[in-house]
Amino acid sequence: MSTRGAVPAGLTLSDEVADALARHAPVVALESTIIAHGLPRPRNLQVARELEEIVRAAGAVPATVAVLDGVPRVGLDKDQVERVAQDQDLRKLGFRDLAPALAAGASGATTVSGTAFLAARAGIRVFGTGGLGGVHRGWTTVQDESADLGLLARTRITVVCAGVKSILDVPATLQRLETLGVGVIGYGTDRFPGFYLSDSGEPVDWTAGTPDEVARVMRAQDVLGGHESALIVANPVAREQQLDPGLHDRVLADALAAADRERITGQAITPFLLGYLTEHTGGASLEANLAAVRGNVALAAGIAVQWSRQP
Ligand code: PSU
Ligand code: MN
């Protein structure tokens, strides 16, 4: 008997994803905001395809998530992936934006919160991304905390990421995750990764060394029951591929000052800072970002494969 509920009406799954879920074959959710708003064109399209390829090579099915013309889609075809990468008018959709976007027939790329919600509703348990949103620096004045955190506190999904974006207040974000009861495990490390950097300088309490160990934690979550919360698997970028820490700190300080001067706030701040870093590190931050995402997506696929083998 299937342990997964029926796919709720209103969600559109690609045939490939629907078929894989029905067979309990491994599926990995991928977000579209990183493609539409987090990476420069035309490289973003190449990356979108490459990430799907990484999932396939590991024996799982990729499910890129987006809302197109008011339809929430889990699993995109070739043309739809192209549209996400190329359409300049795509909005950025967190969880709370989904209903208005559906009602308006709008199109948008989903963030971690939008993606995690739709993927979990579809019955997908593993999600690979770059870095989570979190508590922004200057929180005490602007109270900018990504909706990613709250959504993950009430959604049963495993998110593989390279920590949270280093443009954020990392210790404050870890505190919030603790308060919200979201589990964090370091993958092969007891240090919380720093997105562009292998180590954010903060510790993590739990470590897993193999996809199977992660799958065992996921099963324990389900055995325990209780609130449906996520599991964050924090997977560091390899040290050889990280951004030079000195360069990182210098350019990040400039980026934060520029955002302040230009009064960039709200949804625009994350794309602004990521773009600033890419431009002012001569593309080095982009390479570190991509290395991190590739590693996360590959690990997510490995975890999805192990998960699909659970009894
Ligand atoms: N990580 C990246 N690039 C991105 C993001 C994360 O490498 O573009 C996106 C994710 O979609 C994440 C979002 O959910 O930024 C957070 O945005 P905000 O801070 O506005 O919640
Ligand atoms: Mn925000």
Image: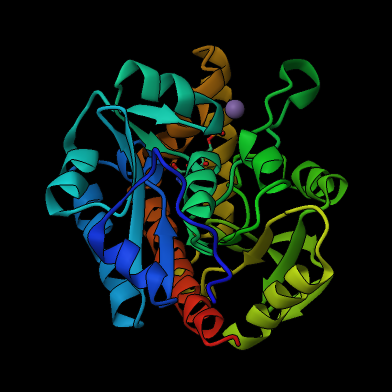
Residue drawn at x 24%, y 23% is 89
In the rendered image, is residue 51 in sight? no
72 relative to 296 in the view: left or right: left
Q: Position of residue 12 (x, y in %)?
A: 32, 46
Residue drawn at x 26%, y 55% is 14
Outermost residue toward the left?
79
Q: Nearer the viewer, residue 51 or 190?
A: 51
Q: Looking at the image, in which quadrant does ligand 2 appear?
A: top right
Q: Nearer the viewer, residue 120 or 261?
A: 120
Q: Position of residue 157 (x, y in %)?
A: 60, 59
Residue drawn at x 12%, y 47% is 79
In the rendered image, is residue 309 in sight? yes
**Residue 291, relative to residue 70: is it above or below?**
below
**Residue 263, relative to residue 123: is it above or below?**
above
Q: Position of residue 214 (x, y in %)?
A: 65, 78
**Residue 226, relative to residue 39: is it above or below?**
below
Give the total number of marks visible in the rendering: 0
Residue drawn at x 30%, y 22% is 106
Q: Is the image coloured rainbow, by chain, by secondary structure, or in one colour?
A: rainbow
47 relative to 301 in the view: left or right: left
Task: Find residue 101 and report its image quarter.
Answer: top left
Quarter of the rendering occupied by the C terminus: bottom right
Quarter of the rendering occupied by the N terminus: bottom right
189 relative to 94 in the view: left or right: right
